[in-house]
Amino acid sequence: MRRLTGTHVYSYVKCPRLAALDLHVPRSERRAMHPWEEFAARRGREFEATYVAGLAAVAPSYPERDFEAGAAATLELLQRGVPLVHQAVLLDGDRLGLPDLLRKVPGDSRLGAHHYEVVDVKTSGRPRSDQILQVVFYADLLAAVQGRWPERGGIVLKDGREQTFAIADYTAAQREVVDELRRLRDQPDRARAFLQAGCASCHHDQRCLPELQQRQDLSLVHGMSHGALAILEQRGCRTVTDLATFHAEGARARGNLDPTLLRRLRRAAQARLLGRPIVEARPRAALGDAALVHLLADPFADRVLAFGVLHPAREDGAFAWAAAAAAADEWRVFRELVLALPPRVPLLHFGDALPRWYAEHAFAREADPALEARFVDVGKRLRTAAIYPAPVFGLADLVRHGLDRDPLRAGHAGAAAMWTAEPDGHERLGAKLRADLLDLAALKAVILDAAPSEPLAAESDAGAQA
Ligand code: SF4
């Protein structure tokens, strides 16, 4: 029987189908990691190694993958009262845990006048629910060894701070996840694929996405939620084609789905079948003469690597960019680029990365409040201005489904930090900023500045029906 591990708990919180596949599909059938995913994983391992190296923690010694021997060696360290244990082996029935650190704390237990609590080392900026449940999973295994639950668990964040939390607040949720993992181990099809933001970075994407397309799954429709999908399927509407012509008279027939939502989902199914976006009729706020501003960041280091601008915000606009060699250069680089633009032009940006960066840096400097007032998030406008032929989670999806262009032709934004160590890294940063800015300009032209699409035949037939 396949053992349940902390990684399965972590995966389940991201996507139950991911946990089911991890339990059943051999590792050899997973997609190979992209270079930038390898780079990020290596940085995580190096961060943990550096953090632990300064702690004088002791690791159990055992033959590779002999977890019974590892659990016995761990127990011996815990009974001896070693202050910190690195990569302990916790084994109980069908569950196996390899926590980063066990830390000795006062309080009686089966081990003596002390017991242990779990600390995991992560590279995120704040604790996430999947990380917390993983720590609680280890705490549950630890409780079986030492005869008592630790009161607290800890997560070390990328800045070296440790955040602790009460284990008791999460034990019920953790038990539910473990129970569901056992059911998935017996019946993997209990969890089905659902297209979501995490699919693009999932090692099972090449398995799930063709399956979803083959069965014309409703999750391929822009704006679909788990709840709406369940209601539609109960009503016999199971595929994108079904939904494109699904008309239900009355609240009961449409499963109490909001009529406006149902109309929007039906149009999204039609957009998918047409293979192009449907531009919505809506009030338009003119942007006039505007510039596009974009950045490439290294989230692990909390750094902006380079800024770029395009003015006017058209594909034939003038492109300029500059890299920030160090954190101390970021503010100067940004200001020089923006000050070279005509005064008062709106600064169009995608998402909250730029305003968040600006707010963090402006606080410590003599920032001009009028500049922040010029920021306009075109990401929000693009999402609401059209119905796309597939869900759109980020800029890459908007480019793919709004323009039918390859958003990765100049590389993946997640690889930007990796490029900085490569001989042609500087040129790659510039090329990526330019490609993203041209894509944003093209999206502005074909979605935000375009006339609304003609009504679709099926839509006019629907009339006032839901
Ligand atoms: S590809 Fe998507 S649906 Fe499939 S397992 Fe991964 S996250 Fe889940």
Image (tube, helix red, strand yellow):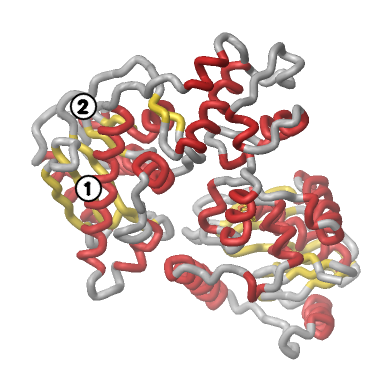
Determine which of the numbered discs, if any, sits on residue 331 in the image: 1
Residue shown at the point (67%, 36%) measured from the top left: 226
Judged left or right of residue 269, residue 66 is: right
Q: Position of residue 200 (x, y in %)?
A: 51, 54
Mark 2, secondary structure of its residue: helix
**Residue 84 visible here:** no
> Residue 30 location, x and y as percent?
61, 69
In this rendered view, identify the residue nearer to me: 463 or 178.
463
112 up-or-down from 369: above or below: below
Q: Residue furthest top?
A: 464
Image x and y of residue 77, in percent: 78, 80
Question: Camera-side residue: 164 or 322?
Answer: 322
Ligand 1 within 8 Å, label 2 CB: no
Q: Is 173 above or below relative to 459?
A: below
- 167 with respect to 35 (left or right): right
* Residue 443 visible within the image: yes
Circle on res. 370: 2
Q: Is residue 24 left or right of residue 383?
A: right
Amino acid type at mark 2: Ala
Count of numbered circles on the image: 2
Spatial separation of the CA atoms under disc 1 and disc 2: 16 Å
Q: Quadrant of the N terminus?
A: bottom right
